[in-house]
């Protein structure tokens, strides 16, 4: 593959781009904004092509690379691939093609969950594609001596979040159905391995039980982005709060993205 080291010009006031198949990456954008409020952000949701998690690796790679390269060309100083599914399908390809560019990816928080107790039982909720991919299975294999993992695909939860159908009777019934075998503190930890799922965090905790530890990778990814920009001398030193721009391949979703960004649930 041709490696491209000549990158577009960007400065510390250039935006950080955040991409996802739809609304889920807003859970990561919220963490980025919390720890770096002075940065400018472009959030791109590919809702017209959502969900990604039931597509093939090749389809997801194409969609992700197209979205990411368009944002790089517009001068984004970092791209956060705020989607576990898109990261497993496209991050290695993008990192190889642009070895000098600060990409941040999302991956299920397997390590902290596996190390959270002595031989914990860890439920991993993610999309079918994430759970099938080699990247995830290699990561899980590294911690197989530390924990027992149970993989549980939850593709329909993506749809509830995409339609902002949060805490609805339908969403609750779906979660109660798939989580029923694990409810009542039968597992020690749950990994939210899809960026859409933190929007259902409260319901998941309620159904699984109060003692179950919940892990999601969004804060870790936001911190990683900050670290990379710091190292590159590209943190925005403006004293003012930055701007957040929402873009979406389905323009009817833009107002919904703003709602999800400010959602207090
Ligand atoms: N938000 C994505 C993730 O983190 C996937 C949702 C989808 O299936 O589109 O895995």
Image (spheres, grey):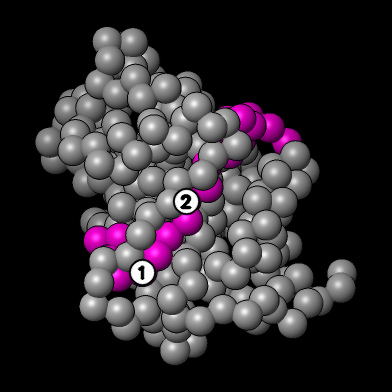
Mark 1 sits on what residue? 39
Quick one: 117 or 203, which is closer to the camera?
Answer: 203
Q: How many marks?
A: 2
Whether residue 140 appears in this view of the structure is no
Which residue is pictured at 17% across the width and 28% down the height?
206
Quick one: 181 or 233, which is closer to the camera?
Answer: 233
In the figure, 14 relative to 120: above or below? below
Residue 164 is situated, as x and y percent measured from the top left of the image, at 36, 25
Quick one: 44 or 114, which is closer to the camera?
Answer: 44
**Quick check: is 38 in the magenta stretch?**
yes
Helix, strand or loop at disc 2? strand
Which residue is pictured at 43% across the width and 40% down the height?
24
Image quarter of residue 117: bottom left
Image quarter of residue 248: top right
Residue 94 is situated, as x and y percent measured from the top left of the image, at 70, 64
**Quick check: is 12 in the magenta stretch?**
no
Residue 34 is situated, as x and y percent measured from the top left of the image, at 25, 61
Q: Quadrant of the C terminus?
A: top left
Picture disc at residue 43: 2
């Amino acid at each position: 593959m041709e490696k491209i080291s000549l990158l577009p010009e960007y400065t510390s006031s250039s935006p950080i781009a955040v991409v996802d198949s739809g609304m889920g990456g807003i859970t990561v954008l919220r963490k980025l904004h919390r720890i770096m409020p002075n940065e400018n952000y472009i959030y791109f949701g590919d809702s017209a092509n959502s969900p990604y998690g039931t597509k093939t690796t090749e389809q997801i790679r194409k969609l992700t690379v197209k979205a990411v390269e368009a944002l790089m060309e517009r001068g984004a100083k970092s791209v956060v691939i705020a989607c576990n599914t898109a990261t497993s399908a496209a991050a290695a390809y993008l990192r190889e093609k642009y070895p000098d560019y600060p990409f941040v990816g999302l991956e299920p928080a397997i390590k902290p969950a596996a190390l959270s107790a002595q031989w914990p039982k860890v439920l991993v909720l993610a999309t079918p594609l994430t759970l099938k991919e080699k990247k995830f299975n290699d990561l899980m294999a590294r911690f197989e001596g530390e924990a027992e993992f149970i993989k549980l695909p939850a593709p329909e939860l993506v749809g509830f979040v995409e339609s902002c159908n949060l805490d609805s009777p339908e969403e609750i019934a779906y979660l109660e159905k798939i989580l029923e075998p694990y409810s009542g503190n039968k597992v020690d930890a749950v990994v939210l391995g899809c960026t859409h799922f933190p929007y259902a965090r409260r319901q998941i905790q309620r159904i699984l039980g109060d003692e179950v530890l919940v892990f999601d990778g969004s804060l870790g990814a936001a911190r990683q982005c900050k670290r990379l920009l710091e190292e590159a001398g590209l943190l925005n030193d403006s004293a003012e709060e930055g701007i957040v721009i929402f873009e979406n391949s389905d323009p009817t979703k833009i107002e919904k993205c703003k709602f999800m960004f400010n959602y207090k649930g």
